[in-house]
Image (cartoon, rainbow, N blue to C red):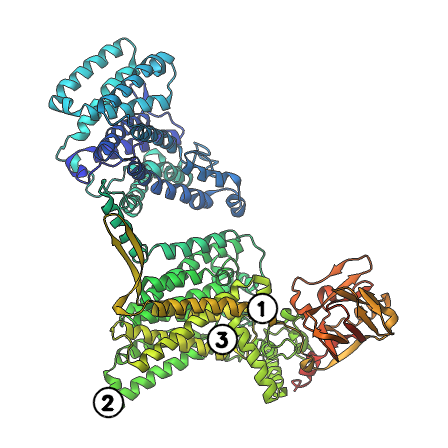
């Protein structure tokens, strides 16, 4: 099929080519419909089907117009670019949507099997002109079984014609029209004597269509002659064709008559036909979309609608998609067609202009990059295992809702989590695969909301920064899961966007109020971290409005006088459903809240043994359900009694801290909230912390620049800059409020990223745009040289912003490396709480050393570094530990090291089995401790859970990385059981 447009836009208005192409494309559709419903296709004079004749027409037109394109601009590069832009964009969309959209919907295979099937991936090879016609499990029961898009076979043949013409042009064979004409004549002579079906008795589509393509090319070269007397040429062709037909040369007769007839009609301008292209050229789209649309219509409606009904339905859908393809894909792609050849200086000028406006003119690139990268990440993990929280809580609640309907809201299970934690999952049948596919849509929404917000904050530059930060591996990794994070992030980014429209653009429309209310509602009903901040913000807005009305001061004349009511209305509407939920829970269950869980967060967030962080970071196990059970409350921490018990235990834990201890405890947590916990850095890599360092430094630098400019009175007076700065200030306040609110609750990097990064990303985007506001691209063109570089606006120096950014990057990496060398995590001996000794080893005969020389019963000298000290665990010890079944156990070793240099790197703990296996959990950081060789006795404490819990005889293995000559004095090893759950429960039994 021809996929080439006329060289000039006016061609659509001055000739009938659009009409001929559209009619030919429709002929292909109608002809195929016979075959797709298991009927014989109608033929043209017994030579070709209607569809085959239409394809010949396309090749004739293509040969004519492509030859015109070459001679109008004989450039190999530009010619190739034009052909690529016409063929591949629409083809790529059709192939990808067919393989991963339509095919996934209609396949008979399980979805994951289909998506991972080799044949599905092979279908994309069509874009390399290696056409595949089948997809696994697709259209297997149709009358024309398995065929997905049988029309695509002509595309590689047409591309081959383009390639031949481009090479001929590159070799100079088309420079003189007579030479190109002789080459065409040579091919025709060979074809008519060796290749035509009249001679061979068998039609070769590649040779035949190439002959018609070249016939169109030749008629372009001969256009001055036949245009003067078109009817005489057509009459001679008709007579010749009749003679050839009478002689039995039917295919040769068609070759002689059809091209001149088609091109005469196409180059004419009849009153009706010449206006077929007024709404665009859908011919290529009809050709591409028709076959899969017809197969889909037949799949669902055949034989109920019959031949005519399915044909009309397929025709309407195909034409609609074809026009959409033209306007959204093909027409947009053709805007990138290279212009006619110009001078070198013009080319250089174009390069400079492109470089200077890369961000402004390629705005689509950044959100598209974020979308594609995130979608690919999610797609690769559609079959990842279900995480613990969804498996135990969210998915069971969703399935219960699907079984019970809205009556589920009257069951206690409904308040264990917020409503959207299970309603979103229930919407997709509680099927993990479909939930993750739906989360792809949430990801796209998050990208769009953040992109628009950042662009409002600081233009395309800020938008690009926001998109790059969005791609940090921490946020996107929650989307291929059934967690609440995707819904929450969609809501928070949407609410942020709505607030930006109100504060920056000063919109007061009903739509923006409704959008903000909807998104805040989604946020509150998925993860209610704003349940205190949102009402407080509403009170602030109402108070501001009331103060302005009463005082009549300058408040009433500020821009906030217009914004405050809009924000108040939006927040007030957003609180309706959460308040209704609270009232329902209060009346039905006596729970005046949106759900349980806050007590758990507070208990774990103030737990001294866990240091307020995820227990697993130190190798521990959750003890909250055990604590609640010991306190005499049945059920888990998600029940009302369990939640109250956890909250009471959290209060007791806080009361046990002195002011100094509490200060250090929360400063340590503040560091982890801001910089992520070292255990998470070990698990996910240092990129996580580097990004956070960079974000924080940019925010601090932009605050410093703003304060400096305000003190010097050099800040921008741009009316647009003031609301941007005000909105950035609101984001900073939200970040600080969130940080304060999060300090008492359980810390992990999931919360740190999801709850803090939305604000930090937007603030960083604003900060980069603010810091680099005076920098822009500048280009210069001279006769013999050109240059592109950075320059500064408004006469400001270029180096302060560049130096600031360089310093930020330097501090990011230097700070990360410095912290990495010094930061460790370990159990705090002073805050372990009560413990019970389950095993106490003091006999030095149970010690075996490696790389050490004995000095006394308990003392050795290191001869090799690293050296190892093994504390033997007997079978009786294993039985003692197993019978106790401690929830959380600890290894406690007292050891003194002495060295002249006082420098030891670390001690590493593992369990060494009798058969020589070294056992360690995947998180090794809690087992690596810095040690001092100062001669004093120090306690080396690690967890004794997981692989470090003895299940078979072996040894506790302590590897010492110390200098040779270091003295090692071992004073005993104990296995302790933490009694914190018992202590906490004893204070909340009443």
Q: Which quadrant of the figure has residue 243?
A: top left
> Rounded to the nearest whole Å, what is the CA distance between mark 3 and mark 2?
39 Å
Sequence-earlier tag: 1 or 2: 2
Graded by Cα atoms within 10 Å as few (under 14), some (14 to 19) or many (20 or more), the crowding at tag 3 reads many
| Secondary structure of the residue carrying numbered label 2 | loop
Sequence-earlier tag: 1 or 3: 3
Residue designated by label 1:
820
> Rounded to the nearest whole Å, what is the CA distance between mark 1 and mark 3?
41 Å
The image shows residue 272 at horizontal and vertical percentages of 15, 35
Q: Which quadrant of the figure has residue 967?
A: bottom right
Please report the residue visible at 38 percent of the width from the left and 29 percent of the height from the top. 35
Graded by Cα atoms within 10 Å as few (under 14), some (14 to 19) or many (20 or more), the crowding at tag 2 reads few
In the foreground, 199 or 663: 663
The image shows residue 684 at horizontal and vertical percentages of 56, 62
In the foreground, 769 or 724: 769
Residue designated by label 3:
594
Quadrant of the frame with the C terminus: bottom right
Residue 394 visible in image: yes
> Rounded to the nearest whole Å, what is the CA distance between mark 1 and mark 2?
56 Å
- Disc 1 vs disc 2: which is toward the camera? 1
Sequence-earlier tag: 3 or 2: 2
| Secondary structure of the residue carrying numbered label 3 | loop
- Rendered image: mark on residue 621: none
Residue 518 visible in image: no
Q: Residue furthest top?
A: 247
In the rendered view, tell whether residue 712 sits above or below residue 184.
Answer: below
Please report the residue visible at 58 percent of the width from the left and 58 percent of the height from the top. 386
Residue designated by label 2:
552
- Disc 1 vs disc 3: which is toward the camera? 1
| Secondary structure of the residue carrying numbered label 1 | helix
In the foreground, 686 or 588: 686
């Amino acid at each position: 099929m021809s996929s080439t447009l006329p060289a000039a836009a006016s061609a659509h208005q001055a000739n009938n080519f659009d009409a001929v192409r559209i009619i030919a494309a429709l002929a292909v559709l109608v002809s195929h419909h016979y075959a797709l419903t298991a009927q014989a296709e109608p033929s043209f004079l017994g030579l070709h089907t209607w569809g085959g004749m239409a394809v010949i027409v396309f090749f004739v037109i293509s040969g004519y117009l492509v030859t015109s394109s070459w001679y109008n601009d004989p450039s190999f590069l530009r010619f190739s670019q034009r052909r690529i832009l016409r063929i591949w964009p629409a083809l790529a969309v059709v192939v990808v949507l067919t393989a991963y959209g339509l095919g996934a919907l209609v396949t008979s295979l399980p979805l994951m099997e289909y998506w991972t099937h080799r044949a599905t991936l092979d279908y994309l090879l069509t874009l390399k002109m290696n056409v595949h016609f089948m997809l696994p499990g697709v259209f297997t029961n149709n009358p024309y079984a398995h065929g997905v898009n049988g029309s695509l076979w002509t595309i590689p043949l047409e591309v081959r014609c383009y390639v031949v013409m481009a090479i001929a042009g590159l070799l100079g064979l088309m420079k003189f029209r007579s030479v190109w004409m002789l080459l065409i004549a040579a091919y025709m002579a060979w074809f008519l004597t060796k290749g035509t079906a009249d001679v061979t008795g068998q039609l070769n589509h590649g040779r035949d269509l190439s002959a018609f393509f070249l016939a169109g090319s030749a008629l372009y070269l001969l256009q001055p002659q036949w245009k003067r007397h078109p009817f005489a040429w057509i009459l001679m062709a008709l007579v010749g064709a009749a003679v050839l037909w009478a002689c039995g040369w039917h295919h040769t007769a068609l070759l002689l008559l059809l091209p001149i007839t088609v091109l005469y009609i196409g180059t004419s301008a009849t009153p009706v036909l010449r206006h077929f292209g007024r709404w665009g050229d859908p011919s290529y789209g009809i050709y591409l979309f028709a076959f899969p649309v017809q197969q889909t219509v037949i799949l669902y409606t055949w034989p109920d609608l019959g031949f005519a009904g399915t044909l009309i339905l397929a025709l309407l859908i195909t034409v609609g998609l074809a026009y959409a393809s033209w306007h959204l894909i093909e027409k947009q792609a053709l805007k990138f067609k290279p212009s006619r050849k110009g001078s070198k200086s013009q080319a250089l000028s174009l390069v400079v202009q492109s470089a200077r406006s890369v961000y402004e003119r390629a705005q689509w690139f950044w959100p598209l990059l974020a979308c594609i990268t995130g979608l690919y990440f999610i797609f690769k993990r559609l079959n990842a295992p279900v995480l613990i929280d969804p498996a135990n809580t969210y998915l069971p609640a969703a399935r219960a809702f699907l079984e019970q309907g809205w009556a589920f809201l009257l069951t206690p299970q409904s308040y264990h989590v917020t409503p959207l934690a299970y309603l979103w999952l229930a919407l997709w049948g509680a099927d993990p695969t479909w939930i993750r596919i739906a989360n792809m849509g949430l990801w796209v929404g998050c990208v769009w909301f953040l992109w628009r917000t950042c662009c409002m904050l600081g233009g395309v530059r800020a938008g690009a920064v926001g998109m790059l930060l969005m791609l940090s591996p921490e946020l996107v990794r929650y989307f291929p899961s059934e967690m609440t994070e995707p819904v929450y992030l969609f809501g928070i980014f949407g609410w942020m966007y709505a607030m930006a429209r109100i504060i920056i653009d000063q919109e007061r429309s009903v739509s923006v109020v409704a959008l903000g209310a909807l998104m805040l509602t989604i946020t509150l009903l998925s993860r209610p971290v704003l349940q205190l901040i949102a009402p407080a913000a509403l009170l602030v807005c109402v108070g501001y409005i009331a103060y302005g009305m009463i005082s009549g001061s300058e408040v009433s004349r500020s821009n906030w006088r217009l914004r405050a009511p809009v924000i108040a209305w939006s927040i007030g509407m957003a609180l309706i459903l959460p308040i209704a939920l609270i009232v329902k829970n209060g009346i039905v269950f006596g729970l005046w809240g949106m759900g349980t869980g806050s007590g758990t967060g507070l208990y774990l967030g103030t737990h001294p043994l866990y240091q307020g962080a995820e227990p697993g970071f130190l190798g521990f196990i959750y003890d909250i359900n055990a604590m609640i059970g010991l306190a005499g409350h049945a059920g888990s921490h998600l029940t009302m009694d369990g939640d109250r018990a956890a909250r009471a235990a959290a209060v007791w834990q806080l009361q046990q801290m002195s002011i100094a201890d509490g200060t250090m405890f929360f400063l340590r947590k503040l560091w982890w909230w801001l910089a992520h916990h070292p255990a998470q850095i070990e698990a996910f890599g240092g990129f996580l912390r580097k990004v956070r360092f960079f974000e924080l430094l940019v925010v601090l630098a932009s605050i410093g620049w703003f304060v400096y400019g305000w003190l010097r009175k050099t800040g921008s007076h741009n009316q647009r800059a003031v609301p941007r700065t005000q909105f950035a200030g609101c984001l900073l306040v939200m970040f600080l409020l969130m940080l304060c609110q999060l300090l008492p609750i359980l810390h992990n990097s999931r919360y740190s990223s999801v709850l803090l990064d939305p604000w930090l990303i937007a603030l960083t985007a604003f900060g980069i745009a603010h810091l680099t506001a005076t920098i822009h691209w500048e280009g210069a063109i001279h006769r013999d040289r050109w240059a592109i570089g950075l320059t500064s606006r408004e006469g400001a120096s270029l180096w302060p912003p560049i130096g600031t950014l360089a310093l930020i990057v330097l501090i990011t990496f230097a700070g990360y490396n410095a912290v990495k060398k010094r930061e460790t995590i370990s159990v705090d001996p002073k805050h372990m709480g009560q413990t019970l000794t389950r095993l106490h080893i003091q006999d030095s005969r149970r010690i075996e050393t490696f790389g050490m020389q004995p000095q006394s019963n308990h003392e050795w000298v290191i001869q090799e570094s690293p050296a190892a000290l093994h504390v033997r665990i007997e079978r009786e010890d294993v039985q003692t530990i197993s019978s106790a079944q401690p929830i959380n156990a600890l290894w406690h070793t007292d050891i003194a090291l002495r060295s002249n240099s006082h420098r030891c790197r670390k001690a590493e703990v593992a369990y060494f089995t009798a058969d020589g296996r070294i056992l360690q959990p995947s998180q090794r950081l809690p087992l690596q401790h810095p040690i001092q060789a100062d001669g004093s006795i120090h306690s080396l404490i690690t967890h004794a859970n997981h692989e470090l819990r003895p299940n078979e005889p072996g040894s506790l293995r302590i590897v010492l990385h110390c200098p040779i000559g270091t003295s090692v004095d071992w004073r005993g090893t104990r296995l302790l059981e933490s009694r914190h759950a018992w202590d906490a429960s004893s204070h909340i039994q009443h």
